[in-house]
Amino acid sequence: MSVRRRFGRVRQLPSGRWQARYPGPDGVLRNAPETFTRRGDAERWLSAAETDLGRGDWADPEAGIVPVGEYIGRWIEERPGLAIRTVELYEGLLRNHIGPHIGQVMLGDMSAARVRTWRKDLLDAGVGAVTVAKAYRLLKAAMNTAHLEDGLIKSNPCVIKGASAEKSPERPIATIKEALKAADAIQPRYRLMVLLATFASLRFAEMVGLQRQDLDLVNGVVHVRRQAIQTNKQQIISTDPKSAAGKRRVIVPPFMVAEMTAHLDRFVKPAKSA
């Protein structure tokens, strides 16, 4: 039995349940994503669909038939300018914490309740709170693109307040005495790295990227021009520093000139003659 309405129609299936159908903006007749026990429920659903259409808040339900894991994988590939480490972080979060749990769920089937359950399951399984926050932030960003840019879903289901925030414990800061003690204890070829980190505030990747010509022994200056990153595939890649302001000149304390000179003499090949 089919019941015509001003908008859409409902019909009773042989099972006794009620099905709602309506025309989308493209003129294609679509079924509601579920059937209903009562005719009134089907009609109320149609009324809500009509309201969504009227205010332009309609999303093609078939557009959301894309697995979450597949969509996020493409999302990562299509982000322009992501740093190598960021790509590896995102891929690891997808592989270890998103894919195994909700990777096969369709975008259109994601809900706030499903996201809450996924997040709770990760925390209950002992995944660190910081890692869970990173995974949630990745999921939220991808779902935001699916909603606002691609129009695949009606809304972003990631609505847990504070779930994106990382609350890492504050790391203890070594004193100058402790840093000098570490420099004395470490293997000699790494002594300069400890000192540069302490007295020049260089990041690890920036120190690894230094070359002989970057150390100005006359003026006591270190020129940061690049950084060297080792990927998960053990490749060493030279890139620009982490930020636009990363390329800089750093004046070091006078005693560091002797340390840099000793390091170059002992561990770095002589400069090529012109």
Image (spheres, rainbow, N blue to C red):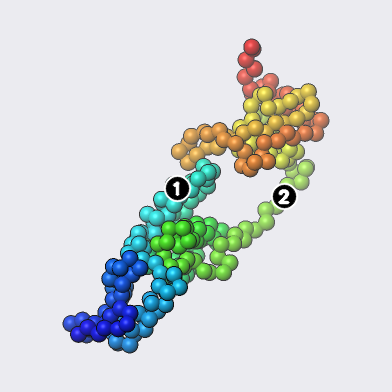
x and y, in percent, of residue 107 in the image: 39, 63
Q: Is residue 75 left or right of residue 85?
A: left
x and y, in percent, of residue 249 in the image: 73, 33
Which residue is located at x 56 percent, y 62 percent? 164
Which residue is located at x 41 percent, y 51 percent? 73
SS at mark 2 in the image: loop
Q: Which residue is mark 2?
A: 173
Quadrant hosting residue 34: bottom left
Is residue 42 shown above or below 156?
Answer: below
Q: Tell me the amino acid under the disc marked 2.
A: Ile
Few, some or many residues within 10 Å of mark 2 (<14, 14–19, 20+): few
Tell me if residue 193 can be seen.
Answer: no
Quadrant hosting residue 57: bottom left
Which residue is located at x 64 percent, y 12 percent? 273
Locate the N terminus by quadrant. bottom left
Q: Which residue is mark 1?
A: 78
- Distance Cα–Cα, label 2 vs label 1: 38 Å
Q: Which mark is residue 20?
A: none
Between residues 225 and 26, which one lies in front from this camera angle?
Answer: 26
Which residue is located at x 62 percent, y 19 percent? 269
Quadrant hosting residue 22: bottom left
Instruction: Residue lying at the far right in this picture: please name it.
Output: 254
Is residue 214 shown above or below 91?
Answer: above
x and y, in percent, of residue 100 in the image: 38, 58
x and y, in percent, of residue 213 in the image: 67, 24
